[in-house]
Image (cartoon, rainbow, N blue to C red):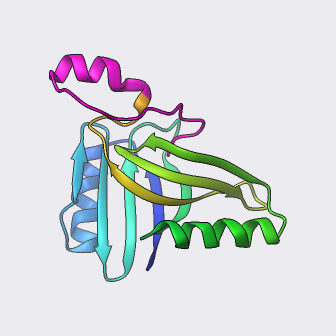
Amino acid sequence: MKRFHVHLHVDELDQSIGFYSKLFDAAPTRIESDYAKWMLQDPPLNFAISTRGQRAGIDHLGIQTDDASELAGLKARAEQAEMALLDEGETTCCYARSEKHWVTDPQGVAWEHFHTLGDIPVFSAKQLPSAIATRGKEMAIEVSAAKRCC
């Protein structure tokens, strides 16, 4: 199954969490100091908000896949359509480790195609060394440099 993904930048996280929790009639499945995510089943939607953007509004759209073969199918379709594609491979972003690639629509809206491989305790792998020391956790995470982060 594929799930539609929307990531918005917001000015006030707590206020936005309250609004979207009421709108979706569901609590977020993940909350961090700068980020919240709802994994809705009806409609199937991965909806994320963060305070990391330069201004409020849509950061990017995307399609999350349940498995690597679905992700490969999206990549093949983009390549066959001769879309410019940025292939990040395995990377970290949005408190998760994922396999992903990006395409951009004619208006410049970024579309992320990704398959989540697991959670991490920080927004991006770039933060892992200090986060590990701060949290005092032993972690075995293969860190790849994030070229673009959601």
- Residue displayed at 55% across by 53% down: 100
- Residue displayed at 31% across by 56% down: 37
Choose between 100 and 44: the one closer to the eye: 100
Asked whether, in this view, residue 72 is left or right of residue 19, the answer is right
Prevailing SS of the magenta stretch: loop
- Residue displayed at 41% across by 31% down: 125
Vertical position of residue 59 compared to residue 68: above or below:
above
Asked whether, in this view, residue 82 is left or right of residue 102, the answer is right
Residue 9 in percent (x, y) is at 45, 47
Vertical position of residue 25 compared to residue 83: above or below:
below
Residue 73 in percent (x, y) is at 63, 73
Quadrant assignment, res 130:
top left
Residue that extends furthest to the right in the rendered view of this protein? 82
Q: Confirm whether residue 14 shows in the render.
A: yes
Tell me the magenta residue range. 126-150
Q: Confirm whether residue 59 shows in the render.
A: no
Asked whether, in this view, residue 6 is left or right of residue 123, the answer is right
Residue 45 in percent (x, y) is at 39, 72
